[in-house]
Amino acid sequence: MSIYQQYKSEKKTALQKELQKKNIHQVPSIDKVIVSVGIGSLATRKGVKDFSDLEKNLMSITGQKPVMIKSKKAISNFKLREDMPVMLKVTLRKDKAYDFLHKLTTIVMPRVRDFVGLNPKSFDPNNNYNIGLATQSIFPELMADDTQAAMGVQINVVTNAETKEDAIALMKALGFIFVEKK
């Protein structure tokens, strides 16, 4: 049974009771997970035109081919021209999204140095959660030689939760650990 099926059959009903929702369809769930790597600093360097290593790393982390995002307009202060590569991103939905989040909470987060929990203030106004990891090397799929440049990874967990409390309860049900307020 996949993590997604397990969530739908077991955790969603428990979450319904915890949040005191009358209808099972009111229970929050994950819409999608967006994993992205910014490459703007590499794109401005002379001679760097090949991002296949970063693309291969992101593909091995997520199991899906990333899409190259290009700049929409030029910004001279950042040495950015129109149509320059800015980032690589992957959008995961349903089974792949839940599997990725399970791997993130059970394998990747324990490998982060001095990890005590995630910040509960990282929710945006739409109750989506944003995680920034300083390096890709904490993912078990990547070997030390796979990452030439220390590139960070941005993970956006998009939920359909109506309130921040619902979103936090959903994330905790999926195995996320948050720092307790003092």
Image (cartoon, rainbow, N blue to C red):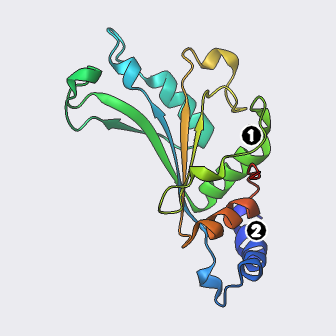
The percent coordinates of residue 21 (x first, y second) are 67, 85
Q: Residue at x 74, y 60 (%)?
A: 172
Q: Residue at x 74, y 40 (%)?
A: 109
The residue singled out by tag 2 in the image is 6
The percent coordinates of residue 158 (x first, y second) are 52, 59
Viewer-side residue, 108 vs 6:
108
The residue singled out by tag 1 in the image is 109
Say which amino acid is labelled 1.
Answer: Met
Mark 1: few, some, or many residues within 10 Å (few <14, many ≥20)? some
* Depicted 141 relative to depicted 175: above or below: above
Viewer-side residue, 136 vs 57:
136
Residue at the farthest top position: 47
Mark 2: few, some, or many residues within 10 Å (few <14, many ≥20)? few
Say which amino acid is labelled 2.
Answer: Gln
Regarding residue 2, the answer to whether it shows in the image is no
Q: Point out which mark residue 22 bears.
A: none
